[in-house]
Image (cartoon, grey):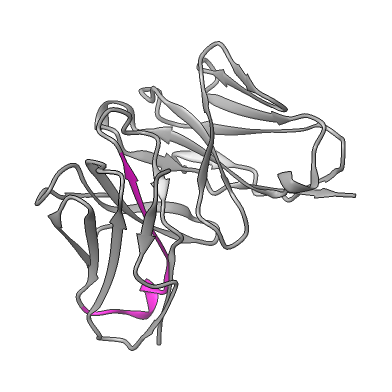
Amino acid sequence: DVKVTQSSRYLVKRTGEKVFLECVQDMDHENMFWYRQDPGLGLRLIYFSYDVKMKEKGDIPEGYSVSREKKERFSLILESASTNQTSMYLCASSSGGNQETQYFGPGTRLLVL
Amino acid sequence: RKEVEQDPGPFNVPEGATVAFNCTYSNSASQSFFWYRQDCRKEPKLLMSVYSSGNEDGRFTAQLNRASQYISLLIRDSKLSDSATYLCVVNKGAAGNKLTFGGGTRVLVKP
């Protein structure tokens, strides 16, 4: 059974703070993804990674960076949080053999004040 | 125009009834199509893939119309537990294995 975990369910930060969101998967998946989900806009891809130390920009990478030092862990970094980054952040992973079935973590609801 | 468009609903459905809804996509190069289900305050989970010939999984039937670029989901004999948001998901075709998610269609099954 695939398990994707995220470090926090709820997070409150102040404008300008550096924010780290951690995601860990236990199924040895090659691919990992970070999305944000906002009402009326659906899920939007921020960054993804097909391998360790590899990263590619998604549709809305501005204001974010990522790190994948180990296969099981994919971190999303907000260098200087802003109020428009208040959102639900979802991490997902998928195997190399079936890249399109993505398994999601429970999400982190981030509030930036 | 959004890449994947869905009627946000809600579709209010009496228990035991049938409900169907569509999703349109703009990228004609898309090759793979899916329906994900998302319960309130939970993460999305794969419900079913959608194949060209149409496919069925229990009470759920998915259809793909490539000519008109839409996919559909039909739920028969609706259960209270079917209440959720259904996300239409399309891959980005030649651009790689990235997925594009629709905004979701909310379904509320009532007794």
Figure check: B1 above or below A47: above
- Residue A56 is situated, as x and y percent measured from the top left of the image, at 17, 48
Q: Position of residue A39 (x, y in %)?
A: 54, 61
Q: Residue furthest front?
A: A1
Q: Nearer the viewer, residue A9 or B31?
A: A9
Residue B14 lies left or right of residue A89; in this view the side is right
Residue B80 x %, y %? 79, 47
- Point out residue A98 in the picture as x, y percentages from the top left corner: 33, 29
Residue at image coords 41%, 41%:
B100
Q: Is residue A113 above or below residue B26?
A: below
Considering depth in this image, is A109 or B79 the residue closer to the camera? B79
Classify B100 as above or below B73.
below
- For the residue pair B41 and B97, the one nearer the viewer reads as B41
First to last magenta residue range: A80-94
Looking at this rendering, what residue extends furthest in the top direction? Answer: B53
**Residue at 34% in and 33% down:** B92
Q: Tell me, yes or no, whether the highlighted magenta stretch contains residue A90.
A: yes
